[in-house]
Image (cartoon, helix red, strand yellow):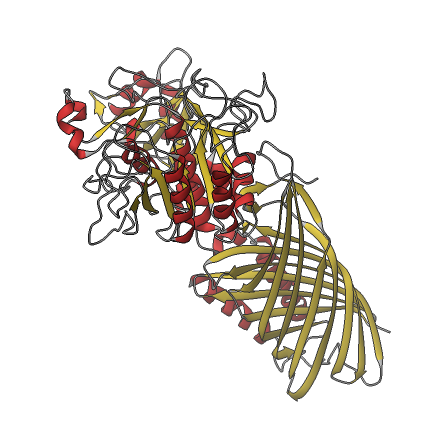
Amino acid sequence: MKKYFTFILAALFCLCLPNESFPQQQDVSFSSGLRIKPGAQFEYFNRTMTWDDEKYTTDLKATLFALNLEIEINEGFSISGLAGYVLSDYDALIFRQLPFSVELDAGYIGGYIFGAEIRKSLFHVSSFEFGLSGQFLYHMGKEKTWNVLGLNVTGTATGKPTWRRAYAGPYIKFSGLESLSSYLAVYYNKLWGRFEMKQTIQTLEGTEEKELLPKSLIDITIGTILTLSDYFFLTGEVHVLPYSDGMDLGFVAIAAFSF
Amino acid sequence: MKKSKIALLVSILFIFFLSSSFDFPRFRKQKPDHIRMHRYQIYPFNNGQPHIIGERHYAPDRVLVKFNPTLSTQTIETTINAYQAKEIKRIPKLDTYLLEIPANSTVEETVYALRLNPDVAHVSPDYKTFVTAVPKPRDNLFFRQYYLYNEGQEFHIFGLRGKNRADIKALEAWEETKGDEQVVIAVIDSGIDFEHPDLANTDEVEKISPNGYDFVNGDNDPSDDHGHGTFVSGLIAAKSNNGEGIAGVSWHSQILPLKAVESDGTGYVSWLVEAIRYAADNGADVISMSLGFSLGPNEEVPSLEEALSYAKSKGLVVVAAAGNEGSSVLYPAAYDEYCIAVAATDYNDSRPAWSNFGPEVDVAAPGATIWSLVPTWLEELYLDDYTLDPYGWGDGTSASAAIVSGCVALIMSIKPWLEPDEIMDIIRYSADDLNVSEYPGKDEFIGYGRINLEKALVPIKLITSK
């Protein structure tokens, strides 16, 4: 509870520190006309996933490296696409439908990521901007093969993870500082995970597809955009996704140019 | 501008604060207890000295000390030096010190000396911890069942001890499943003792299926007038964890008793064929046959082979004993395509000479000095106090086959969709190849090896990338 309280206080602090006494207010990320903002993005998130009606849980840890291209079509409305590489790590994902049950605890599995994002500013009140934003990501993992050890015959298991993530929701952004703007967003954030595991041990063969759903669905995001020049921005985001008996976290860092 | 920079700095610090405290597991629930360490039992002090029971169970060169909270750091350091000890680390929050004791002193002496010091709040050796043991069933005779869990305990009245973990790893497997009452094991044997306390049906448990049949007398009362059927039935699925008697391999499975052996321990193939067909048509999932006969080179029993084929086609897994003559594998176990043929091992994971052998042997399971049920009506025949209860010792691949039948039932309990051939291969491939140095791979003596329920049932960790 103390963590929540501290977090909320810090968020309010970030949003409320600047006030009307700052004369040089300007929106650093929106301007008139078409603007193109290529950038690079790093993201790490940890998500508690469940299967079999929440009977079992696993932790999905993902590290993303992506290039993105944001197109600001007009002031306050932008769409962007991204593509990159992601490392996904499932902790203690158990497959019991195979001839020999296996538990995946094997580190990161690489794969590709594609996605799109949309952001629409709705209205401004003083230095505060209110809007909506959303993102969709699709991760296509690469197959990875492990030896099934401990048996008196040889065998392998081949796994392939995929997941999709979509979030959308309102945001409030404060742009009252010269080179810094902060925002707070509350998203509905859902992640659909899927893991296909094939097993071949001599005469035994089996395939199990596991559908995974997140325990957390509400995403409270706090972020800061640092304008280093008219053409270069840094963005940092922290995602907090509470659920009934725990909390998932994520962190995003974006470096973007603007033309 | 100055305020702007302060705000910028605060925001950056805030983001970095959050990112640097990304110890994600802190926010989550703890993992289940069975993978956590726990503190070893701490024995009471005896005149300031800890008891030493058997092997030393604490570090020989260090102690844990907490000083009175009023003491300054300087005083604590002086005190530590006075004992010629050396601070290894201080455990924050608890203000407890881990001290390395001088080479010329013992843990016992140091503990004793520190306890006399009024500035010391408490002191103890640095005890070893152990991972939590897999729980054993509460059955009071479980310690005799080395075949289920062998920690080298004295399991026999003559002081016999086995080799540590020369067992089928049942405790580990029971963490995954203890069997399902829907899985029915047809025991084709001499019948069953309906009155035996470790088998008898009660209001809560229907351990014995009411659909049993007596093919010897042609009625539906398969009462055991020999004892063998009760013995093997107990091994497969005795009532378990009930504080009484023994544990079965598959705790919750049901026995379908099919009597095809007379009171003298013999029977006819015709009864056997009928029983197999009956089991296949009356809801059995597994057939356990701790019996057999030999055939000459040009002899065959097609009707038995057809019955086995019929059972397999209906999804039943058939387990049969290899035999105890130290010769070739008996029938029906020798019908390789339809049966898991089971040889025997003992409490040291060795093969008894009497265990039959041949290319048909698939796996082995403990079959020497096996403790199981004897019929209640045999009680008066026993003399010493260990047999006042209806339990006794037995040897033979009959026991081995029964144990494997229980293993099949456990697999079927959690993977009912598997085909008979798949289950047979799981049992084969998961066995421990005990004689790998002499006969690597499958051999004629123990087949693929002594069964290992843990490997057959517990998820195998995928940790090595290919």
User: At x 21% / y 37%, what residue is drawn?
Assistant: B244
Near-viewer residue (B201 or A245): B201
Where B229 sits versus A95, above or below? above
The quadrant of the picture occupied by the N terminus of chain B is bottom right
Near-viewer residue (B253 or A163): B253
Near-viewer residue (A132 or B156): B156
The quadrant of the picture occupied by the C terminus of chain B is top right
Residue B203 visible within the image: yes
Near-viewer residue (A56 or B287): B287
In the image: residue B275, left or right of residue A134:
left
The image quadrant that residue A238 belongs to is bottom right
Residue B133 rendering spot, x and y as whole percentages? 37, 35
Where B175 sits versus A169, above or below? above
The image quadrant that residue A15 belongs to is bottom right
Q: Tell which residue pokes out farthest to the top in this image.
A: B104
Q: Tell which residue pokes out farthest to the right in this image.
A: A259
Residue B349 rendering spot, x and y as whole percentages? 45, 21
In the image: residue B13, left or right of residue B45:
right
Q: How many marks?
A: 0
User: At x 74% / y 84%, what residue is drawn?
Assistant: A76
Where B350 sits versus B256, above or below? above
The image quadrant that residue B15 belongs to is bottom right
Residue A87 rendering spot, x and y as whole percentages? 69, 53
Residue A129 visible within the image: no
In the image: residue B291, left or right of residue A14:
left
User: At x 40% / y 35%, what residue is drawn?
Assistant: B269
In the image: residue B32, left or right of residue A85:
left
Residue B386 rendering spot, x and y as whole percentages? 18, 24
